[in-house]
Image (cartoon, rainbow, N blue to C red):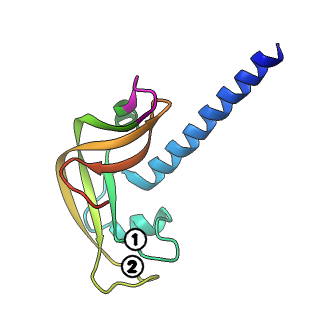
Amino acid sequence: MKILLSCLLILMLVDDSSLATFETFRRQNIRDPIGENECEEMIRGREINVRTCKEAHPFIVSTEIELRDICKGKGNLDMITSTRKFTIVRCVLNRGAKYPDCKYQGSVLTNRPLVVKCENNLPIHFYDDTNVTGF
């Protein structure tokens, strides 16, 4: 009985940590909709820059449900490429911008398969889209 309870407790902890990690993924990467002129507002509002300006940051224009579907039935995979294509707003730091005045130029990228890490059937890290590198 003690072993069964211990196993259940461990499973509950694993599920909670995956949800917390998915929550971070969601907060930092998902936006529906976002325009290319909203980069500073989105990065500041989601606390992505901490004591420095991040060189580039992508926002996936999608719903949480669409992104969850990428990992559905996949369990734990270091990298998986989505079959569905997404729109991304890529925010790139303007030349010469310095913290705390981080200014970004956004560009809309369409028709992009995403590369994500899945844990417990949830996306927890956005590596890249398959057409652009450097996030």
Judged by its main secondary structure, the magenta piece is loop
Quadrant of the frame with the C terminus = bottom left
- Mark 1 to mark 2: distance in Å? 8 Å
Q: Position of residue 26 (x, y in %)?
A: 45, 47
Between 23 and 78, which is closer to the camera in this rendering?
Answer: 78
* Residues tagged 1 and 2 counted as in contact (Cβ below 8 A): yes
Between 24 and 44, which is closer to the camera in this rendering?
Answer: 24
The secondary structure type at the circle numbered 1 is: loop
Quadrant of the frame with the N terminus = top right
The residues colored magenta run 71-77
Mark 2: give few (<14), some (14-19) or many (20+) Cα within 10 Å. many
Which residue is the extreme one toward the right?
2
Q: Can the viewer see residue 63?
A: no
Q: Which residue is mark 1?
A: 54
**How many numbered callouts?**
2
Mark 1: give few (<14), some (14-19) or many (20+) Cα within 10 Å. some
Q: Which residue is mark 2?
A: 102
User: Would you say 7 lies left or right of 15 here?
Assistant: right
Callout 2, which amino acid?
A: Cys
| Residue at image point 45% right, 27% down | 75
Above or below, 3 against 105 in this view is above
| Residue at image point 34% right, 33% down | 70
Give the mark nearest the N terminus, 1 or 2: 1
